[in-house]
Structure formats: C-alpha cells, structure tokens
Image: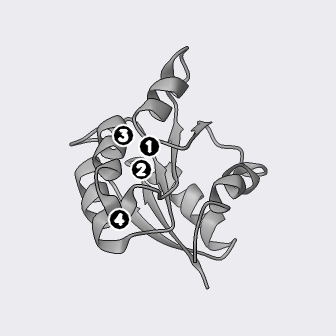
Amino acid sequence: MKISTLVIEDNENNMYLTTFLLENSGHQVHQAYDGTDGVKMAKELLPDLILLDIQLPKMNGYDVAKSLRQDPALATTPIVAITSYAMPGDREKALDSGCNGYIKKPINPDTFLAEIESYLTMVKH
C-alpha cells in the first residue's frame, strides 16, 4: 500500500524535487500550493504524512499545523516542517505549533528520504 503524503509548498522547484523523491520511493503525493488549500486537502484526504513549508501564502505553516492539530482525524498525523527558517528558535516554534519534525532547506536529495523515514514509523495502517 502506498503511503499517502501531502506536500504543502508554494515554490515550484521545491515541490518538484520533493514530489520526485517521494514518488520514486513509492509515495502517493498530493500537492497544495498555499496554507488554506493545504488545510482543506488534509481534511479531505487524511494523508499518512504531511510535509509542510512554513512560509506560505494565505496561511503560514505555523497556523496550518495548529489548525490541523485541532481536527481529531489529523491530531496524530505526522507533520514535518521543511523550511528555510533556520534562525535560533525556529525549530522550536515549528514543533510548538504541532509539527513532529523539522528539516532545513535546501533539502539534501541524498538524505531526504532517510530523514523523513523516522516519521513514517508513526503511520498506522
């Protein structure tokens, strides 16, 4: 069974790379290009994993994570922030908003799948 992964990312190049890596690893990838659409899609799809940019149009990633955590159906879905925000405190802010993990951009294609692998162990099928 393919792992359903929602990628919420507004940058085309980042979306392409992330989707390419995930699909080549057997994920079924769904894409949202802004925070509002990401929340809507997450509630409709109930994905196994959510990869979330923080700097998004319409609704930032912190607010997206908080909103998703308020939905009982998504309360335990792994959310990994993938962001260029790398200042002191940014990781903690992402985790405090409801993210389970934090990966700094630019992602490393050689290690990306291994980095998210630990979050997939949370997925219950």
Q: Which residue is mark 2?
A: 9
Between residue 104 and residue 123, name the one nearer to us.
123
Q: Which residue is mark 4?
A: 73
Q: Which residue is mark 3?
A: 61
Which tag, 1 or 3, sits closer to the chain's start?
1
Q: Please state, as top left, top right, bottom left or bottom right, where the C terminus lies in the image.
A: bottom right
Distance from label 2 to label 3 (Cα)? 9 Å
Distance from label 1 to label 3 (Cα)? 6 Å
Which tag, 2 or 3, sits closer to the chain's start?
2
Q: Are marks 3 and 4 in contact (CB under 8 Å)?
A: no
Which residue is farthest bottom?
Answer: 1
Q: Is residue 94 above or below residue 77?
A: above
- Asked if residue 123 lies left or right of residue 71, the reply is right
Between residue 49 and residue 18, name the one nearer to us.
49
- Asked if residue 14 lies left or right of residue 112, the reply is left
The amino acid type of the residue labelled 4 equals: Ala
Count neighbours of disc 4 (C-alpha within 10 A) and say few if under 14, some if 14 to 19, many if 20 or more: few
Distance from label 4 to label 2 (Cα)? 22 Å
Distance from label 3 to label 4 (Cα)? 19 Å
Between residue 110 and residue 121, name the one nearer to us.
121
Q: Which residue is mark 1?
A: 53
The amino acid type of the residue labelled 2 equals: Glu
Count neighbours of disc 3 (C-alpha within 10 A) and say few if under 14, some if 14 to 19, many if 20 or more: many
